[in-house]
Image (spheres, grey):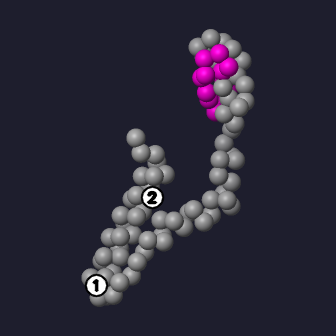
Amino acid sequence: MVGSRTLTALVGVVASLAVSVAAWVYFDTLLVFLVVPFVPLLFRGLTGGDGDRPPERTCPECGFTTRSPEANFCPRDGTELRER
């Protein structure tokens, strides 16, 4: 299955190609708007990335993982979760 970021990037590339073709037909000159989908990548470091998400915690017995701050114990066997 394609991730949401990949799908967003693909939609952005298709949209930018469509705008480029429309501009080429209308203005009779080649304008390429492929840079537009990659603009958010320039600001990835400024937004914090994954730093604002809670740490992933894992059950050492069965491998269950969660990022939920409410879950302290594994729902399968009751073992206390540990941070990775």
What residue lies at 40% left-to-right and 78% top-to-bottom?
A: 32
Residue type at mark 1 is: Tyr
Rendered image quadrant of residue 14: bottom left
- Determine the main secondary structure of the stretch shown in magenta: loop
User: Can residue 73 be seen from the camera position used here?
Assistant: no
Residue 30 % position (x, y): 35, 84
Circle 1 sits on which residue? 26
Q: Quadrant of residue 56?
A: top right
Q: Kindly identify the residue that appears in the image at 31 percent across and 76 percent down.
A: 21
Label 1, residues with CA under 10 Å away: few <14, some 14-19, many ≥20: few
Residue extending furthest toward the left = 25
**17 over 24 or under it: above or below:** above
Mark 2 sits on what residue? 9
Residue at 49 percent across and 51 percent down: it is: 5
The C terminus is located in which quarter? top right
Inspect this view and state whether residue 21 appears. yes
Nearest the eye: 78 or 84:
84
Q: Is residue 17 left or right of residue 41?
A: left
How far across and down, in percent of the image, does residue 80 sit?
A: 72, 18
Residue at (42%, 52%) from the top-left corner?
A: 7
Is label 2 in contact with label 1 (beta carbons under 8 Å)? no
Q: Quadrant of the N terminus?
A: top left
Q: Is residue 15 above or below residue 74?
A: below
